[in-house]
Amino acid sequence: MSTRTEPIRAVKGTRDLLPPETWRWQKVEDEARSVFHAYNFRELRTPIIERTELFARSVGADTDIVTKEMYTFEDRDHESLTLRPEATASVVRASIEHGLFNEGGAHKLYYMGPMFRRERPQKGRYRQFYQIGAEVLGSDHPAIDAEVLEMLHLFLERVGIKSFTLLINSVGNSKCRPEYVKVLRRALESVKSTMCPDCQRRAETNPLRVLDCKVEADQPIIARLPSILDHLCPECRQHFDRVLAELKQRGIPYEITPRLVRGLDYYTRTTFEITSGALGAQNALLGGGRYDGLSEKIGGPPAPGIGFSIGEDRLVLAVEEAERSKEASKPESKDAALTVYVAWLGDAALGPASTLVRELRRQGLSVEIDYEPTRLKKSMGIASKLGARFAIIIGDGELARGRYQVKDMSTGGQEEVEPAEITRHIESRLRSLNYFAEESRKPL
Ligand code: HAM
């Protein structure tokens, strides 16, 4: 009796991203790079593992992320390491470590990559998920807050997401927030016993976290708690008003949401989220805010900062949803985007066919060839299955004439072209078909 080995599956909450879906990921990443570049952001890549202490001190020891969700392990030399649950702390750590703050002026950095949180997996929520984020370090000017939101607005527009809502709030600073927390703690005294066990604990340890509790039964109680916007100091009030005025001036709609304190402890002043109706329960497409004291918390110089992280998994879902609703042309066919399939018939044709394939690929065209001898009819079947725009056929007759057959797969039309002319021929045909039009850069 044969015993079959069980296939090994991906870890719960992680997933493989397969083609053609990966094409869409590449598209949103390309668009992000292009928009970020226009706003003078440059890419930073930080390690995926960091010392656990970095997140305890920045994200906050009493946040859900740090208490329940981090993948933390002891390294062989007994150091506690953590798979990054987010990247803002790493960006600030790296900026301190490499002296970016000493250079003065605002530094604009962006990153893309996987983050890890041990949450309950569901649609739009994974244990390994991806973020595209950007941070501005070294300025607390309210116009920077508005510029970051303007950039996000443009980015979402560029990837085709039309229906989204910007929720915005101010959580004050180290001067006024402790006062508000006292008020909140007092207000919680009389109601906390009716709240969920987490809130009962948070009411003692970190009352602000009560405001982002997701438990349904707690929501009416939370709605009646005092609002942070009524407790901002004059400087924070003025900062917030200026951010809102800048947004108005830039034509960016927003909704003021006083409970939006966000699940991370490093925030000061501006906090925001963008939600999308297309996403269902996990509707936060992105989140961000200002973190003016974060650098000091992890041993750096005073350096204000603001940034955001887009949940790329959710972004891709929202882009798909937007495309479905406008019934756009099938993305699969664009993903294939194979320009040429080269079919060869007879041993003598294989060498010239390989040479042609190499030449076309060097010209940047997407080209495929099969090295097994294949009958013409089958080759044409493969070419059309691969979505090739053209098939090139090389057999003994073509070799003898020194001209190859170039077949337009959409019309079936066929022409004989000299090998040296093939790239030019294909490119001019593609141009006349407007093939490159949608790929060409639109002005920002
Ligand atoms: P965050 O709100 O924790 O903020 O995460 C930002 C976004 O990441 C969320 O809005 C969501 O789209 C996505 N996200 C979070 N957890 C998951 C998950 N388990 N599965 C899928 N997507 C998820 C931050 O991470 C801050 N670093 C944002 C920031 C940057 N603040 C200032 N600068």
Image (cartoon, rainbow, N blue to C red):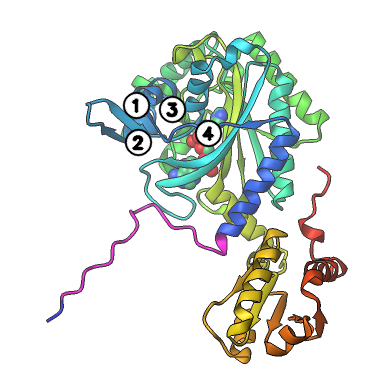
Along the line of sight, the residue nearer the viewer: 99 or 146: 99
**Element carrying mark 3:** helix
- In this rendering, the label closer to the viewer, 1 or 2: 1
User: x, y percentage for residue 274?
Assistant: 62, 40
Along the line of sight, the residue nearer the viewer: 73 or 178: 73
Work out whether residue 260 can be spotted: no
- Residue annotated with mark 4: 45
User: x, y percentage for residue 268?
Assistant: 56, 19
Image quadrant holding the N terminus, namely bottom left
- In this rendering, the label closer to the viewer, 2 or 4: 4
Q: Is residue 27 above or below residue 2?
A: above
Q: Quadrant of residue 290?
A: top right
Question: Spatial distance from mark 2 to mark 4, Cα to Cα?
Answer: 20 Å
Question: Spatial distance from mark 1 to mark 2, Cα to Cα?
Answer: 9 Å
Q: Which residue is found at the position 82% from the left and 83% from the top?
A: 415
Q: Which residue is found at the position 64% from the left and 85% from the top?
A: 380
- Residue annotated with mark 2: 70
Which of disc 3 and disc 2 is earlier in sequence? Answer: 2
Question: Spatial distance from mark 3 to mark 4, Cα to Cα?
Answer: 30 Å
| Ligand 1 neighbours mark 1 (CB distance < 8 Å) | no
Q: Amino acid at mark 2?
A: Met
Range shown magenta: 3-21
Q: Are marks 3 and 4 in contact (CB under 8 Å)?
A: no
Q: Is residue 373 magenta?
A: no
Q: Amino acid at mark 3?
A: Arg
Dot 1 surroundings within 10 Å: few (below 14), some, or many (20 or more)? many
- Residue annotated with mark 1: 52
